[in-house]
Image (spheres, grey):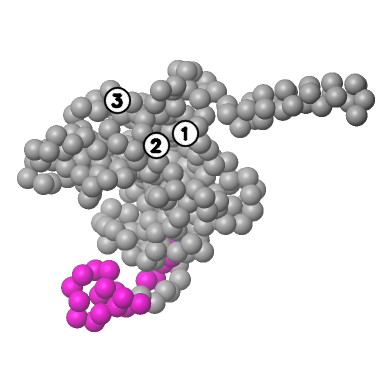
Amino acid sequence: MTLKQQLFTTLIALIAPIYLSAQTVKPDTAGGYRLVWADEFDRNGMPDSTNWGYERGFERNEELQWYQPDNAWCENGRLIIEARRETKANPRYEANNTEWRKNRKEANYTSSSLRTRGKRSWQYGRFVMRGKIDISNGMWPAWWTLGVKGHWPATGEIDIMEYYRKKVLANMVCLGPEYKDEWYSRTRNIDSLGGERWASQFHIWRMDWSEKAVALYVDDMLMISVETDKLVNKDGTGINPFKQPHYMLLNLAIGGQQGGDPSKTKFPKRFEIDYVRVYQKKGE
């Protein structure tokens, strides 16, 4: 190797790590945050299995959909979660069972719920998602987190983005007195934001979560901010589920206790996500 080639090789070795760092670790716009994890969905096909797993079947809130991986995929740099009107047999069906997950012979809708449980979790930071929701009757899209320890609601839950029945919501929940769920919630009527026109566009949802407070935003508009110390479980344990790592979920539910009536809605419907990013400050 000539001296010129040696110098060129050395220069590349010095520059490459800096270049790659600049491409993969981007500073946020303010606050001293640095990107620690992201999924830009820049692939075609199934979402990255190192980041995401799936919920399956009937899950919660007496919702109508059957969750399955087939309804989620990546294309054109976006994650697509698609709700469909289709029949799915329930393998857990028991005719005389009173539990709702078992007394339904079949599901009439399918969708997907992705989660980072067991793969990725974070404690504190700035969480950002750019997405587009469908506000048709019966649609219940959400981007949310759950604590890695405990049983709900003692796990703690943060609904960074939730929509149903003409409302955009931002919520937090912990275990309240008498072992009931204790909610902190703010809503905005979808018409006050711009209705169908607003929903046809992509928007940015954000959570700023620190040891001191949890604040939830949409398009930089503060929805709710709660001091973290108020979110302690009220069962005498002194456990604060918002001072532990959380994993995140992305899902599109249908109907159920809150989602509304989808019977006259035309399917398929989509929840589209451009990216999800997690930033943290040094030491978090």
Residue occupied by mark 2: 122
Q: Quadrant of residue 239?
A: top left
Tell me how far mark 1 sits from mark 2, CA to CA. Answer: 8 Å
Q: Which residues are magenta?
A: 91-111
> For mark 2, does the 10 Å Cα neighbourhood hold few (<14), some (14 to 19), or many (20 or more) residues?
many
Residue occupied by mark 3: 211
Does the image show residue 44? yes
> Is 193 or 63 nearer to us in this picture?
63
Going 45% across and 55% down the picture, which residue do you hit? 53
Query: Given the current orientation, which residue lies at the most extreme bottom position?
Result: 95
Going 25% across and 41% down the picture, which residue do you hit? 156
Work out whether mark 1 precedes mark 2 in sequence or the reverse, and give the earlier one: 2
Residue 7 pos. (x, y %):
84, 21
Residue occupied by mark 1: 278
**Lateral position of residue 56 relative to residue 204, left or right:** left
Query: Given the current orientation, which residue lies at the most extreme top position?
Result: 31
Q: Main secondary structure of the magenta part?
A: loop
Query: Pointers 3 and 1 in contact (CB under 8 A)?
Result: no
Work out whether mark 3 precedes mark 1 in sequence or the reverse, and give the earlier one: 3
> For mark 3, does the 10 Å Cα neighbourhood hold few (<14), some (14 to 19), or many (20 or more) residues?
some
The answer to whether 158 is drawn above or below residue 116 in the figure is above
Residue 114: say if magenta: no
Which numbered mark, 1 or 2, is in the foreground of this view?
2
Residue 102 pos. (x, y %):
26, 73
